[in-house]
Image: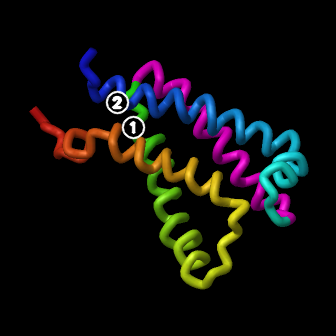
Amino acid sequence: MEITTELKLKVMFWYTLVASFAFGVLMLVAPEFVIETMGWPVQDPLIFGLMASLFTAEGIWSIFGIKNPRKFIPVLLMQMTYKLIWFIAVVLPTIITKTYYMESLLFTIILGTYVIGDLVAIPFKEFLAPRSTT
């Protein structure tokens, strides 16, 4: 079986639908359970809810991406971009200053799999190529 761009994109959309959507909804309906289970410190409910909403929205948009992967590449680009920014601007400084919560390691690894998957799946050369006007 050939691993096509279409297949790679669909895998990332399914991964986002199953994992991100489920986790986002769980964060919305049972935030205390998620915080306690993950061993995280107490969270600001508005910021925590914002992240939960973002994860949920990624999952919802992934439904459309499964049906038409190339059209919904921007969903994966957005997902990859904010997670890369998070790694560089938040995770890396906490590691450098030795203030990183080891309880966040699993979460960090999972988010890293999205970045790697998006980098592998997104056909950057094709997506960013100039459009022909003819």
In this rendering, would 20 be left or right of 116? right
Q: Which residue lies furthest to the left in this view?
A: 134
At x 65%, y 44%, the residue is 55
Q: In which quarter of the image is the N terminus?
A: top left
Q: Name the residue under label 1.
A: 73
Q: Which of 28 and 39 is in front in this view?
A: 39
> At which x and y percent is residue 99?
67, 79
Q: Is most of the magenta stretch helix, strand or loop? A: helix
Q: Position of residue 10 (x, y in %)?
A: 42, 26
Tag 1 secondary structure: helix
Residue 116 in the image, given as x and y percentages of width and height: 41, 48
The disc labelled 1 sits on which kind of residue?
Ile
- Magenta stretch? 42-68
Q: From the viewer's side, name the closer residue of 75 and 109.
A: 109
Question: Crowding at label 2, few (<14), some or many (≥20) Cα neighbours within 10 Å?
Answer: some
Looking at the image, residue 99 sits to the left or right of residue 71; the answer is: right
On the picture, is 116 further left or further right than 28?
A: left
**Dot 1, crowdedness within 10 Å: few (<14), some or many (≥20)?**
many
The single residue placed furthest to the top in the displayed view is 1
Q: What residue type is labelled 2?
A: Arg
Mark 2 residue element: loop
Query: Which residue is pictured at 63% across the width and 39% down the height?
Result: 20
Residue 67 versus residue 107 in the image, above or below: above
Check contact, mark 1 vs mark 2: CB within 8 A. yes
Q: Name the residue under label 2.
A: 70
Q: Given the current orientation, which residue lies at the most extreme bottom position?
A: 97
